[in-house]
Amino acid sequence: MDRKYNIDDASSGKILEIANHFLASNLSLRTFAKEYCDFSHVTLRKKLLTVLPTINVLVSKQIKEKLDESRAKNIDEDPLARIRTLSAIDLLLKEDLTIPKIAEYLNSTEMTIYRDLTKRAPIMEEISPETQKEILLKLKDHSRYNLVNKGR
């Protein structure tokens, strides 16, 4: 399907068409939105969870189940996030790469890498308190460097 859905489609009865297309696509929500919507996956998720239930409860339930099953609840349930986080820590501490460079190297986003280093790393058992402190200090150093180089 070459059609792009717009925000009006997602806010109307066409949300059912979008939902069925998403279920049939076997794509992640992010990928589906990128390919078929002219709005973000965040907006699509919100519309699927708020508008769709008023139109079709059964399809809404299927959507909720698909969204819940594809979403890792924490770092222990997501082995790829664990590997990415450990790689990001290595690149930060051993190679002194910045978050944008780490994101580029790992083919990820800056926000994901930032979350890996600041939220996920501290709850991983294999990351010592000393390493956690090193991560925060290195991020602080990079932050200071960015401020100085931007003339602030």
Image (cartoon, helix red, strand yellow):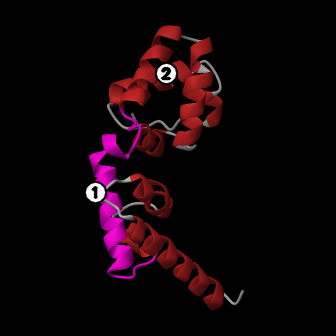
Quadrant location, the C terminus: bottom right
Front residue of 68 and 73: 73
Where residue 53 appears, as percent x and y from the top left, is: 58, 15
Label 2 or label 1, whichever comes before in sequence order: 2
Mark 1: which secondary structure? helix
Q: How far apart are marks 2 and 1 (CA)?
A: 37 Å
Q: How crowded is mark 2: few (under 14 residues within 10 Å), some or many (20 or more)?
A: few
Where residue 13 appears, as percent x and y from the top left, is: 60, 18
- Which residue is painted at 34% across and 30% down in the image? 25
Where residue 92 appears, as percent x and y from the top left, is: 39, 75
Q: What residue type is labelled 2?
A: Glu
Please say if 114 is above or below 69.
below
The quarter holding residue 39 reads: top right
Where residue 106 appears, as percent x and y from the top left, is: 33, 65
Please say if 84 is above or below 13.
below
- Which residue is painted at 42% across and 52% down in the image? 123
* Residue 17 - label: 2
- Which residue is painted at 48% across and 55% down in the image? 119
Mark 2: which secondary structure? helix
- Which residue is painted at 40% across and 79% down in the image? 97
| Count of numbered labels shown in the rendering | 2
Please name which of the two marks, 2 or 1, marks the residue nearer to the observer: 1
- In this rendering, would 102 be left or right of 38? left
In magenta stretch: residue 98: yes
Quadrant location, the N terminus: top left
* Span shown in magenta: 70-99
Please say if 40 is above or below 118.
above
Tag 1 residue: 83
Q: How crowded is mark 1: few (under 14 residues within 10 Å), some or many (20 or more)?
A: few
Q: Main secondary structure of the magenta part?
A: helix
